[in-house]
Image: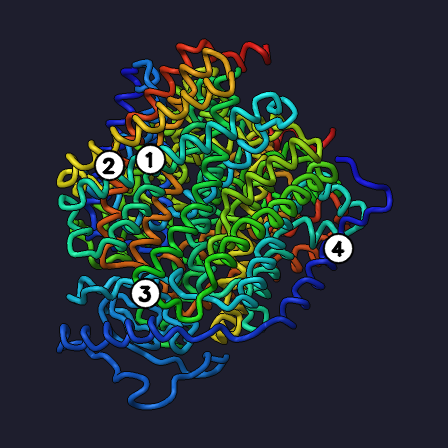
């Protein structure tokens, strides 16, 4: 740990020295800031992860805190421009995570737990949305962006907030599973619930966004209808995902070598193009992974093994960037509300997930420890909140600030709870033992 | 690799051609973005107000319609303006204080806004990025499919088995080098094809910086002081004299033309860069002549070492250039040139030490890989941010890494060639695509400089080899290098190394106004000319260059490590 700390200190010192050379973002060459930010985050985040691992804490939390500390709102070693320019890494990481997750979801093995997964997902989401919506209405006088709105508008905003705050984080969940080598009923059920809930959140958001547009008289100006958008997002993503799966399979069968490079190239394109064609890169890659594992016969283990070398630096940068993107300044102002909503969200998710597991007879271990997988929150909620901020500047910006503040709490606390739960369920390290 | 027997792998070139033809049929102009235009207009007006003493041209729309694109021979507009000033017809990163601007690729309303930062000029809200520009669905699909095709080809082209099949098909010289990818980048950038437009190219800049650093790092890792004693006698003398003569010949020849013929205010800098590019040789020529039986194995080993080490010499020249002619004028630090040089060396050494430390504490091969990737990217970014060449800083770091292998474990992790090779060829291929896309062969200056460059280089090499031979005969008469025919040594060292192209690309990145990109034309075309001269020379000498040895030296996709060189040692 000492060596990792020394290394971390050296990287920070070098970065600070380099950044003291010229005015912010005045680089000799465009692109230098991106490479610098990427290299710095890989080196620093991996060391921070090692320090946290030595302290028996999740590496992922180390990556996140590294990003928080070095980000624009704290030490400022990473500028907003650098963070923005590294968006591509974010997209690629989400795609890789989704591909790996899809590859891990063996539907045949999951079939006995399918009922439990579906019921728990629906119950957890509905409870969380209802609880957060009611809390928003209850505290509407304390929420600046809701003051002055009509009753219908308040309900619409509250419902939107409920959907946004109920979102989960498959990325964090999968990363923790991967880091801890977890396997077993708790891990499998958690993964199914989190992935399904993520898809449901996208559907729910499209519905509430349409409601907001109607209540606030937002004229689309030739934009696509919400239903069409949803169809494109889900249907289009599924179709493109199938094509991606076929391409990967063809490469694997015909070329065989350098599959990781090919997959990376596919992920880059899925990310860049998906965002511009209203496709969800996460869905695209999730579908691809699912098809590869369950239909096309390319085992998820093969994908995970192939992607492991490329995945490590990308995940480290992804989570560090998530940390760097956290709005500490907003959290400093909104922390009482953020804490309130975090508690309400956690209570609703934990209670309903436990009830769902009990109702479907998922087993005692699943009932006790699976709900902890629902606490982490990152990724999709950020994107949706930013979309809202753009479409409804009057109240969307405030909603975005609150969502990011709540997410700040959940993204730090969530991994710790999940790791604790997996350890208590006795599922950590099982994958490594099985491979042995 | 499991391929059907009927597969014709070299046909992927045909596939590319068909794809590109298809894309060109789809080609359509990108939609104009009124918002971006408005932002730029506002920024331009605000800049004009904020900088009353700046010699800014009037707004283009106030005077005449903007030109669509500069063709060869069209006199470029000349603007003198401080960095970060936005005008309608200036690529913003070309604008550097006190530098004469002649943007190589002037496209109306198509400002490369990647590093447009108007804060220095007091303009708020003018920061914008190209990624904000919307594209039509047609062009998006075209770009998507194009990028996908390029990426797939880059990965596919990196396959050793593909290379073997190409050799068997007799296409190794072309397809086994970076030529197709250079051409691919060039064609993809063509407005009629439009796959790699300014926006995509700007997005790919980080890959270019990383590629340069990777090449520099690999060059550095070939210099191990522990192996100096193993060099054949006279190697260092030959390397120093022949590369110094080629460097001086080209620097003086092109310098005179630049100064007296064109009145180039930066003629010293530009001549030094061209001289450095001319100094480097590729090992492929030595290998080919050795296989043809014209060079004895011991002499071939020495000459290959010469061809590897002159890269380091050239990079040292680039270090001197970037220390003396500072590319960044907005820096807080003020140092004399020698201070910058020491800083550059110190930075390389420290980053090399950091890389070794990172590799030593890596827990597993995946972490080693991540650390190497991170260290090279960090080196590239830090070096460039301070205005140095990532090629040079990474080379210095590579030298330190290679020479600080203090434990067997570190040595294994650093020299695990298999892991490096996995991405090596892909990095090279992607690098050539970007270089090809950035190449502006239509600028006529480069073609005028080319004959001087090629002639001065071959004359310098000949003079250097002769001088070195005389010195070797005097100092070490029994050495194999002294007993090799001067003409054979000269011809063997004629092919230019890939580092020459990396070097000029790096210089171009540091000094965007570098003769409007014409130096790239000189070096790329010069490398191809050197290769042809080598083949002619080999034919005259009676050697037959076979497929296995026929990489185009400057565009060869791998740079032999000492281990690989030993593996490929010419049989007795």
Locate the C terminus of chain B and report the quarter of the image it occupies: top right
> Residue placed at 61% from the left, 40% from the top?
A288
Q: State how far apart marks 1 and 2 are (Cα).
A: 9 Å
Q: What element carries label 1?
A: helix
* N-terminal-most mark, 2 or 3: 2
- Label 4 resides on the chain identified as B
Residue A310 place in picture, x, y as percent:
50, 34
Tag 1 near tag 2, CB within 8 Å: yes
Locate the N terminus of chain B and report the quarter of the image it occupies: top right
Q: Name the residue under label 1.
A: A320
Q: What element carries label 4?
A: helix
Q: Name the residue under label 3.
A: A217
Residue B178 place in picture, x, y as percent:
61, 52
- Same chain shared by disc 4 and disc 2: no
- Label 1 resides on the chain identified as A
Q: Mark 4 points at which residue?
A: B539
Which is closer to the viewer, label 4 or label 2? Answer: 2
Q: State how far apart marks 4 and 2 are (Cα).
A: 61 Å
Could you say which is closer to the camera, residue A109 or residue A269?
A109
Up-down: is B137 above or below A119? Answer: below
Query: Visible in this render: residue B5?
Result: yes
Quarter of the image for residue A284 reads: top right
Q: State how far apart marks 1 and 4 are (Cα).
A: 58 Å
Tag 3 near tag 4, CB within 8 Å: no
Q: Residues within 10 Å of mark 4 (few under 14, many from 20)?
A: few
Quarter of the image for residue B43 reads: bottom left
Q: Mark 2 points at which residue?
A: A70
Q: Is mark 2 on a helix, strand or loop?
A: helix
- Same chain shared by disc 2 and disc 3: yes
Which is closer to the viewer, label 1 or label 3? Answer: 3
Tag 2 near tag 3, CB within 8 Å: no
Residue B240 place in picture, x, y as percent:
46, 43
């Amino acid at each position: 740990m000492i060596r990792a700390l020394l290394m971390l200190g050296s990287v920070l010192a070098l970065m600070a020295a380099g950044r003291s050379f010229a005015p912010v973002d005045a680089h000799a060459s465009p692109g230098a800031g991106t490479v610098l930010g990427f290299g710095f985050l890989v080196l620093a985040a991996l060391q921070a992860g090692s320090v946290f691992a030595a302290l028996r804490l999740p590496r992922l939390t180390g990556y996140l805190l590294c990003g928080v500390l070095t980000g624009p709102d704290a030490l400022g070693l990473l500028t907003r421009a650098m963070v923005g320019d590294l968006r591509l890494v974010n997209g690629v990481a989400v795609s890789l995570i989704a591909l790996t997750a899809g590859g891990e979801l063996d539907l045949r093995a999951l079939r006995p737990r399918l009922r439990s997964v579906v019921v728990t997902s629906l119950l957890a989401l509905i409870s969380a949305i209802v609880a957060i919506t009611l809390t928003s209405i209850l505290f509407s006088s304390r929420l600046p962006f809701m003051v002055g709105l009509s009753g219908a508008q308040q309900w619409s905003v509250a419902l939107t907030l409920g959907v946004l705050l109920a979102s989960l984080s498959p990325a964090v969940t999968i990363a923790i599973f991967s880091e801890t080598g977890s396997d077993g009923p708790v891990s499998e059920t958690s993964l199914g619930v989190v992935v399904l809930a993520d898809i449901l959140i996208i559907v729910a958001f499209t519905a509430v966004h349409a409601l907001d547009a109607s209540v606030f008289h937002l004229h689309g100006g030739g934009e696509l209808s919400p239903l069409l958008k949803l169809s494109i997002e889900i249907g289009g993503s599924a179709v493109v995902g199938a094509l991606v799966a076929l391409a990967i399979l063809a490469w694997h069968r015909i070329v065989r070598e350098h599959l990781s490079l090919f997959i990376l190239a596919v992920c880059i394109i899925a990310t860049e193009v998906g965002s511009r064609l209203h496709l969800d890169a996460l869905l695209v890659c999730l579908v691809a992974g699912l098809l590869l594992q369950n239909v096309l016969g390319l085992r998820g283990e093969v994908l995970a093994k192939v992607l492991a070398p490329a995945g490590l630096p990308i995940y480290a940068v992804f989570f560090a960037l998530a940390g760097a993107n956290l709005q500490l300044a907003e959290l400093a102002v909104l922390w009482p509300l953020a804490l309130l909503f975090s508690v309400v969200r956690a209570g609703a998710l934990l209670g309903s997930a436990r009830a769902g597991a009990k109702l479907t007879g998922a087993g005692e271990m699943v009932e006790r420890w699976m709900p902890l997988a629902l606490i982490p929150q990152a990724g999709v909620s950020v994107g949706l909140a930013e979309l809202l901020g753009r479409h409804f500047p009057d109240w969307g910006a405030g909603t975005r600030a609150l969502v990011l503040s709540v997410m700040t709490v959940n993204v730090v606390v969530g991994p710790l709870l999940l790791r604790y739960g997996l350890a208590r369920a006795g599922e950590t390290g099982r994958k490594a033992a099985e491979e042995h | 690799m499991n391929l059907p027997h009927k597969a014709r792998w070299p046909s992927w070139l045909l596939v590319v051609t068909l794809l590109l033809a298809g894309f060109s049929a789809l080609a359509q102009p990108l939609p104009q973005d009124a918002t971006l235009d408005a932002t730029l207009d506002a920024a331009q007006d605000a800049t004009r107000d904020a900088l009353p003493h700046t010699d800014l041209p009037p707004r283009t729309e106030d005077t005449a319609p903007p030109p669509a694109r500069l063709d060869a021979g069209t006199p470029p507009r000349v603007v003198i303006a401080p960095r970060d000033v936005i005008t309608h017809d200036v690529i913003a990163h070309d604008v550097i204080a006190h530098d004469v601007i002649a943007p190589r690729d002037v496209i109306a309303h198509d400002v490369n806004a990647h590093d447009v930062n108007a804060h220095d000029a007091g303009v708020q809200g003018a920061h914008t990025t190209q990624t904000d520009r919307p594209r039509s669905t047609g062009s998006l699909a075209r770009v998507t499919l194009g990028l996908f095709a390029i990426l797939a080809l880059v990965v596919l082209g990196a396959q050793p088995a593909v290379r073997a099949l190409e050799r068997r098909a007799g296409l190794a010289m072309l397809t086994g080098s970076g030529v197709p990818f250079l051409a691919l980048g060039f064609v993809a950038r063509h407005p009629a094809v439009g796959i790699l437009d300014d926006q995509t190219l700007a997005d790919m800049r980080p890959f270019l910086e990383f590629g340069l650093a990777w090449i520099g790092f690999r060059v550095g890792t070939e210099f191990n002081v522990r192996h100096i004693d193993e060099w054949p006698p006279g190697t260092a003398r030959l390397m120093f004299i022949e590369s110094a003569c080629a460097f001086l010949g080209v620097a003086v020849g092109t310098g005179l033309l630049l100064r007296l013929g064109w009145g180039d205010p930066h003629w010293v800098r530009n001549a030094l860069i061209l001289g450095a590019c001319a100094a480097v040789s590729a090992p492929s020529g030595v290998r080919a002549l050795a296989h043809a039986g014209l060079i004895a194995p011991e002499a071939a080993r020495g000459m290959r070492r010469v061809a590897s080490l002159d890269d380091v010499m050239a990079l040292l020249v680039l270090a001197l250039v970037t220390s003396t002619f500072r590319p960044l004028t907005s820096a807080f630090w003020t140092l004399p040139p020698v201070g910058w040089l020491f800083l550059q060396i110190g930075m390389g050494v420290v980053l090399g030490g950091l890389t070794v430390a990172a590799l030593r504490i890596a827990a597993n091969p995946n972490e080693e890989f991540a650390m190497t990737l991170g260290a090279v990217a960090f080196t590239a970014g830090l070096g460039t941010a301070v205005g140095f060449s990532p090629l040079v800083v990474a080379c210095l770091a590579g030298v330190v890494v290679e020479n600080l292998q203090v434990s067997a474990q570190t040595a294994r992790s650093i020299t695990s060639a298999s892991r490096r090779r996995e991405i090596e060829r892909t990095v090279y291929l992607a690098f050539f695509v970007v270089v090809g896309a950035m190449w502006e062969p239509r600028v006529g200056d480069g073609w005028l400089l080319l004959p001087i460059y090629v002639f001065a280089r071959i004359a310098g090499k000949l003079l250097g080899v002769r001088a070195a031979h005389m010195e070797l005969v005097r100092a070490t008469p029994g050495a194999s290098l002294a007993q090799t025919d001067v003409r054979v040594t000269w011809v063997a060292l004629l092919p230019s190394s890939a580092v020459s192209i990396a070097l000029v690309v790096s210089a171009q990145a540091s000094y965007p106004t570098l003769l409007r990109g014409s130096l790239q034309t000189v070096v790329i075309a010069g490398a191809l000319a050197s290769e042809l001269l080598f083949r002619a020379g080999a034919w005259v000498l009676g050697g037959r260059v076979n497929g296995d040895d026929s990489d185009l030296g400057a565009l060869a996709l791998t740079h032999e490590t000492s281990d690989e060189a030993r593996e490929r040692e010419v049989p007795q």
